[in-house]
Image: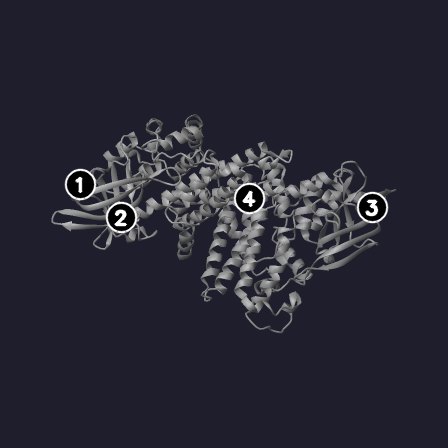
């Protein structure tokens, strides 16, 4: 029994921490959010140079062959600074599906992702299917030797910047994962800002004509790859949430020590102290489930799916509590958009909505 | 990172499990525990004597004082197995409270005199800390001990004294000097409950049970050689006792058992709201359990569980209490017929399911958990000060 991070893992954490301290204060971040792409291309280049974009990929594909533990280290630090670069969509989500597929071009696509020159986003959500992503309406039909794609996809993370999309569609009443270029004929992309300052795209497919090389996986294989991607993504955004919770309670403690009312720092008041303790406790409990889920996923434990749902429930509830308390204890400053603290609340709210919210995962937990 | 237990630890776990399931385990204790019937003093003695007969009594003591010398992981596994086998709790007053204080701060004569009886469970200890005017503010205690030749004369009273009605001995914090700073002038005294001038009066709690007592001291003559360590250093020893690694404080395995029971009870209830609450409780329990493992991993590496163990106390008791609420919810209107703990021992069968009455008793009884052992509010003060620095 040993729950310590390895030296290598600690070095990675230090590296990300230092990067964020230098390049990611609140003003830097505001500038990034105001840019056209919604992320910093300079930062992305540095991510590539530092090797971070190679973290989860296998050595055969030019990666470092790191696992869920390293990803959670990275994301926890991202969460502390509310990093918006499209790591989740391009590296974790697309990367998991590509690497798990048998597509002949996967090595070359992954190589381009690792170098930072190429971004891929996964299109899985649709307006009328809730969180049951595999029941999608977007259809891939056969047309002689070719395939035709029709339908639409919602909430595609980083959709406006992606060079390629991995699309979840229905083919022959079973799931299919296909990869298409962003400039393919019949595809239109509209980009939106999200509540937490990131971007997403609405995709619509009108008789998009594809050949069989577009197919990444079909049937059970596609479903299993997709679910694997969702589990790992939940793990990553949960780690991000733990980082954001840590920052939230620490910033709140700092603020209450500095803010004076009634001729004393408001941190002297017990009712505020106990609220901050509640924030701390929820953060630690979330961290515990995060580590449990990480280790289970890392060792292919059959219980991991259930733990992932438990983690998502905890992240949803704790994020809400920590985020709301942080805003409350900052008083009027908490609701000011010019202070970072409210942006953590926005990120917690966004994270809860992704890949199944609290309610969804309570139900899922009960089914397992 | 690796959370698995070693082969040796798993083998150890098997040995404990086999021992607890063996024929030496007192059958009447097993039966009462399965039925949720309260144990008598003799039952408790039988159970503890059994634990001693296996050589497990000093599970958290070093070898030199007759303990097992087990590692933190072994202690964790041992306590887990006890809970899974529905054993009663090993009473902490002698073994985990006064025992370590005696072997750490007592003199040789005191060690020889008291420690073997604690391990063999020949003496039943109780704890004399709280007073009517001193709860969370324990250091304000007023029970006085005045040295008179080779005796102390003790006057005052203690309260909430758990199972004092069965106790042979009490360890007490007493004031031997009135000082500027209230933490000074406190001493740690061992007192024979049969000494003239001691009176024990029951306090009946809201569940109708007699678990706690008031203990009154009127001119009680206590031999001075029953003082532990130095006069005036009692507060240091008391803090040592509180900080002494308190394994199992979160009560995870017991809650796990109860949760399974609740699931079985409610399996045909067709109450999706209740099922949802059970699932949410189970998720919170999983988070708590892994937090305990994180603490254990830190201890196993030689670290000290700091204020973090306050999380275990706070969240553990919250979960225990929520669980009792869910049992009450499951029992519905059949919580109404209630005859208290004595009713369970009678042969009358009240209306409704057999879990109903014990559920409400447990619900009422477990309100204590967030109050005792340093109330949850005090635990939050500790975290605020020690971890958040406010």
Q: Along the polypeptide, which appears first: circle 4 or circle 1?
A: 1
Q: Nearer the viewer, mark 3 or mark 4?
A: 4
Q: Position of residue A24 (x, y in %)?
A: 42, 29
Q: Is residue A274 left or right of residue A188?
A: right
Q: Nearer the viewer, mark 2 or mark 4?
A: 4
Mark 4, secondary structure of its residue: helix
Task: Please say if the residues under marks 2 and 3 sit with CB atoms less than 8 Å apart.
Answer: no
How many callouts does the rendering have? 4
Q: Position of residue A302 (x, y in %)?
A: 38, 50
Please give the chain letter of the residue carrying mark 4: A
Q: CA distance from mark 1 to mark 3?
A: 97 Å
Q: Nearer the viewer, mark 1 or mark 2?
A: 1
Residue at 80% x, 56% y: name it: B199
Residue A217 visible, this angle: yes
Q: Position of residue A173 (x, y in %)?
A: 23, 55
Q: On residue A222, which mark appears?
A: 2
- The residue identified by callout 4 is A278
């Amino acid at each position: 029994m040993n729950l310590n991070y390895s030296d290598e893992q600690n070095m990675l954490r230090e590296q990300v921490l230092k990067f964020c301290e230098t390049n990611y204060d609140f003003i830097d971040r505001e500038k990034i959010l105001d840019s056209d792409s919604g992320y910093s291309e300079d930062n992305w280049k540095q991510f590539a140079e530092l090797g971070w974009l190679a973290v989860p990929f296998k050595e055969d594909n030019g990666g470092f062959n790191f696992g869920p533990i390293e990803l959670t280290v990275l994301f926890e630090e991202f969460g502390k600074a509310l990093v918006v670069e499209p790591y989740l969509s391009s590296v974790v989500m697309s990367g998991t599906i590509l690497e798990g597929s048998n597509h002949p071009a996967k090595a070359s696509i992954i190589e381009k992702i690792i170098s930072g020159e190429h971004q891929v986003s996964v299109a899985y959500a649709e307006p009328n299917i809730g969180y049951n992503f595999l029941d999608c309406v977007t259809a891939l039909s056969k047309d002689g030797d070719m395939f035709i794609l029709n339908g639409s996809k919602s909430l595609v993370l980083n959709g406006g910047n992606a060079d390629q999309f991995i699309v979840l569609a229905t083919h022959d009443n079973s799931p299919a994962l296909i990869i298409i270029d962003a400039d393919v004929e019949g595809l239109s992309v509209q980009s939106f800002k999200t509540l937490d300052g990131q971007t997403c795209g609405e995709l619509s497919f009108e008789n998009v004509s594809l050949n069989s090389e577009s197919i990444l996986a079909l049937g059970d294989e596609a479903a299993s790859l997709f679910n694997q991607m969702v589990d790992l993504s939940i793990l990553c955004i949960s780690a991000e949430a733990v980082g954001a919770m840590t920052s939230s309670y620490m910033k709140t403690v700092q603020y209450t020590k500095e803010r004076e009312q009634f001729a004393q720092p408001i941190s002297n008041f017990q009712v505020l102290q106990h609220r901050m303790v509640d924030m701390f406790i929820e953060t630690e409990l979330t961290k515990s489930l995060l580590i449990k889920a990480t280790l289970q996923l890392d060792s292919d434990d059959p219980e991991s799916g259930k733990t992932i749902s438990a983690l998502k429930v905890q992240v949803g509830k704790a994020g809400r509590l920590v985020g709301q308390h942080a805003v409350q204890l900052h008083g009027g400053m908490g609701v000011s958009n010019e202070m970072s603290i409210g942006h953590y609340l926005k990120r917690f709210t966004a994270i809860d909505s992704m890949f199944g919210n609290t309610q969804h995962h309570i139900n899922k937990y009960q089914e397992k | 990172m690796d959370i698995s237990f070693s082969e040796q630890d798993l083998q150890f776990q098997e040995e404990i499990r086999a021992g607890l399931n063996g024929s030496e385990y007192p059958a009447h204790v097993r039966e009462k525990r399965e039925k949720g019937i309260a144990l008598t003093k003799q039952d408790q003695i039988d159970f503890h004597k059994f634990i001693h007969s296996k050589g497990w009594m000093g599970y958290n003591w070093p070898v030199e004082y007759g303990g097992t010398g087990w590692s933190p992981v072994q202690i964790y596994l041992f306590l887990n197995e006890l809970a899974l086998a529905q054993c009663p709790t090993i009473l902490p007053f002698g073994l985990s409270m006064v025992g370590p204080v005696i072997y750490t701060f007592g003199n040789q004569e005191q060690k020889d005199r008291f420690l073997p009886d604690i391990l063999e469970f020949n003496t039943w200890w109780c704890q004399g800390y709280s007073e009517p005017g001193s709860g969370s503010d324990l250091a304000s205690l007023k029970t006085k001990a005045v040295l008179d030749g080779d005796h102390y004369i003790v006057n005052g009273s203690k309260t909430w004294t758990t199972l004092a009605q069965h106790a042979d001995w009490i360890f007490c914090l007493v004031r031997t000097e009135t000082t500027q700073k209230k933490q000074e002038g406190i001493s740690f005294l061992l007192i024979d409950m049969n000494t003239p001038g001691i009176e024990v009066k029951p306090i009946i709690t809201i569940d109708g049970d007699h678990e706690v007592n008031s203990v009154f001291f009127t001119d009680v003559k206590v031999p001075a050689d029953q003082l532990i360590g130095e006069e005036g250093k009692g507060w240091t020893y008391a803090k040592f006792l509180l900080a002494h690694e308190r394994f199992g404080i979160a009560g995870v395995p017991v809650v796990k058992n109860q949760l399974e029971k609740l699931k079985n009870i409610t399996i045909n209830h067709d109450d999706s709201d209740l099922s949802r609450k059970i699932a949410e409780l189970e998720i919170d329990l999983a988070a708590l359990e892994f937090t305990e493992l994180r603490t254990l991993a830190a201890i196993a590496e030689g670290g000290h569980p700091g204020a973090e163990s306050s999380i275990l106390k706070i969240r553990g008791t919250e979960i225990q209490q929520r669980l009792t609420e869910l049992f009450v919810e499951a029992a519905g209107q059949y919580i109404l017929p209630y005859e208290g703990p004595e009713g369970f021992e009678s042969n009358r069968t009240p209306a409704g399911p057999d879990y109903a009455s014990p559920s409400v008793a447990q619900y009422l009884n477990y309100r204590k958990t967030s109050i005792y052992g340093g109330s949850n509010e005090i635990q939050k003060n500790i975290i605020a000060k020690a971890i958040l620095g406010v």
